[in-house]
C-alpha cells in the first residue's frame, strides 16, 4: 500500500501533485533546491485550495488539514519513510538521471520511484536507478488539481506489482489512469504534440491567424482550448523539447519541430510563463 508520498520539485507540476495527494489524505514531503522555491510552491497550493473553499467544493477545515499534511524541505533524506517518491523536475533527461541517482540511496528498499516526464524514456530512466522493477512513469496533466487523467507508463523493467500499486494510487487520489508502453510521447502526447506542431506549421505558412486556427479547432472539433493557446499554456520550450525527443526517437521527418517554434523559443517567447507566446499575456 502507498501511504506516504515524496515529491521532488515544488514547481507547477510538483505543487499540483502535492495538493491532490494531501487533499486525498496522504502525508507529503515536497523538496526543492531552495526555501524560496518551496515557499512559492506552498503559496500556489494554499491559493488553489482557497479557491476550492470559495467554490464550496471543500471546507476550510479540510483545506487546513490538507496544508498540514505537506512538509517542505531542501533535504531529500526526509524521503526515507516514503512509500512512493515522484520526481517532478524540469523536462531534462540529464537532470532527471542525476536526481534519480542521488535519490536512490536515501529511499527505503521497497519504496517505489516514479517520474512525471511527458516524453523521456521510462526504460532509460529506470536503468539509472537501483530499483528498475519498482520504477514507473506517472504523467500528470496541468493543472494537476483539475485534470482527471494520470497516464501510467511501464518501462521494460516495470513489474506487475509496481503497476498495480500505481493504479491503486491513482484511484486513491481521485485520478483515472490509462496505461501506455514506453515509446516517445507515450499515448497522449504522441497524438497531442504533433497536432500542436502542425498548427504551428499552419500559422507559419500564413494559412490562418492564430485566433482563427484556435477557433476552428474549438468550434469545429469541440476542443476546449485551441492548440496554439494550449502550446502557450504548456510552454513553448517544453513543446520544443518534446518534439525533439519525437524526432530523434522515431527518426521520422514527420515529427520535425516547426521552424517557427524554434524561433519563438530562441526569442524567449515561451508562452504564459514569459507573458508572450502566440498570444500576449500582459506581463
Image (tube, rainbow, N blue to C red):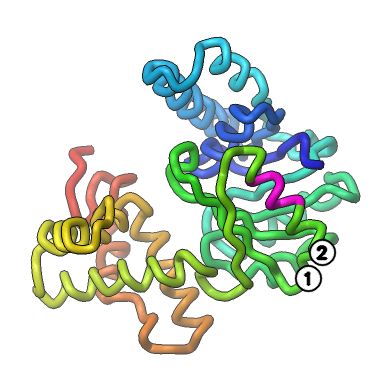
Residue extending furthest toward the bottom: 252
Q: Residue at x 56, y 32 (%)?
A: 19
Residue 143 location (% of width, % of height) = 43, 42
Q: Is residue 250 above or below residue 219?
A: below
> In the visual, does 254 lie left or right of 244?
left
Circle 1 packing at 10 Å, graded few (<14), some (14-19), many (20+), is: some
Q: Position of residue 124 (x, y in %)?
A: 69, 71
At x 51% / y 50%, what residue is drawn?
Answer: 149
Q: Secondary structure at mark 1?
A: loop
- Residue at x 49%, y 22% (from the top left corner): 46
- In the rendered view, tell whether residue 234 sits above or below residue 25: below
Q: Which residues are magenta?
A: 165-170
Residue, disc 1: 157
Label 2, on which residue? 133
Q: CA distance from mark 2 to mark 1?
A: 5 Å
- Asked whether 218 or 258 is in front, the reply is 218
Q: Quadrant of residue 23?
A: top right
Q: Nearer the viewer, residue 222 or 131?
A: 222
Q: Is residue 166 magenta?
A: yes
- Drawn side of residue 110 relative to residue 7, left or right: right
Confirm or deny contact between disc 2 and disc 1 (CB under 8 A).
Answer: yes
Query: Does residue 2 lie above or below 47 as drawn?
Result: below
Q: Position of residue 194 (x, y in %)?
A: 36, 73
Amino acid at each position: 500500500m502507498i501511504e506516504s508520498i515524496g515529491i521532488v520539485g515544488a514547481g507547477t507540476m510538483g505543487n499540483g501533485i502535492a495538493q491532490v495527494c494531501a487533499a486525498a489524505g496522504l502525508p507529503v514531503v515536497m523538496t526543492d533546491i531552495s526555501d524560496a522555491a518551496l515557499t512559492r510552491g506552498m503559496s500556489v497550493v494554499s491559493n488553489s485550495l482557497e479557491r476550492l473553499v470559495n467554490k464550496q467544493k471543500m471546507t476550510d477545515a479540510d483545506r487546513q488539514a490538507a496544508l498540514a499534511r505537506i512538509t517542505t524541505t531542501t533535504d531529500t533524506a526526509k524521503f526515507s519513510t516514503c512509500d512512493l517518491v515522484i520526481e517532478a523536475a524540469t523536462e531534462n533527461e540529464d537532470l532527471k538521471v542525476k536526481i534519480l541517482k542521488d535519490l536512490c540511496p536515501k529511499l527505503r528498499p521497497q519504496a517505489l520511484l516514479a517520474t512525471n516526464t511527458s516524453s523521456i524514456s521510462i526504460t532509460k530512466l529506470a536503468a539509472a536507478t537501483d530499483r528498475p522493477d519498482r520504477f514507473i512513469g506517472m504523467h500528470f496533466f496541468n493543472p494537476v488539481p483539475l485534470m482527471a487523467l494520470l497516464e501510467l507508463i511501464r518501462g521494460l523493467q516495470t513489474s506487475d506489482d509496481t503497476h498495480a500499486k500505481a493504479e491503486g494510487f491513482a484511484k486513491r487520489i481521485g485520478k483515472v489512469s490509462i496505461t501506455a508502453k514506453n515509446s516517445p510521447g507515450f499515448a497522449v502526447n504522441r497524438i497531442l504534440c504533433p497536432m500542436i506542431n502542425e498548427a504551428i506549421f499552419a500559422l507559419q505558412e500564413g494559412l490562418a491567424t492564430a485566433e482563427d486556427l484556435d477557433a476552428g479547432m474549438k468550434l469545429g472539433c469541440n476542443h476546449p482550448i485551441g492548440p496554439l493557446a494550449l502550446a502557450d499554456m504548456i510552454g513553448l520550450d517544453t513543446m520544443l523539447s518534446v518534439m525533439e525527443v519525437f524526432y530523434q526517437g522515431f527518426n521520422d521527418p514527420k515529427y520535425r519541430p516547426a521552424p517557427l517554434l524554434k524561433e519563438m523559443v530562441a526569442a524567449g517567447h515561451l508562452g504564459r510563463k514569459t507573458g508572450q507566446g502566440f498570444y500576449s499575456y500582459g506581463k
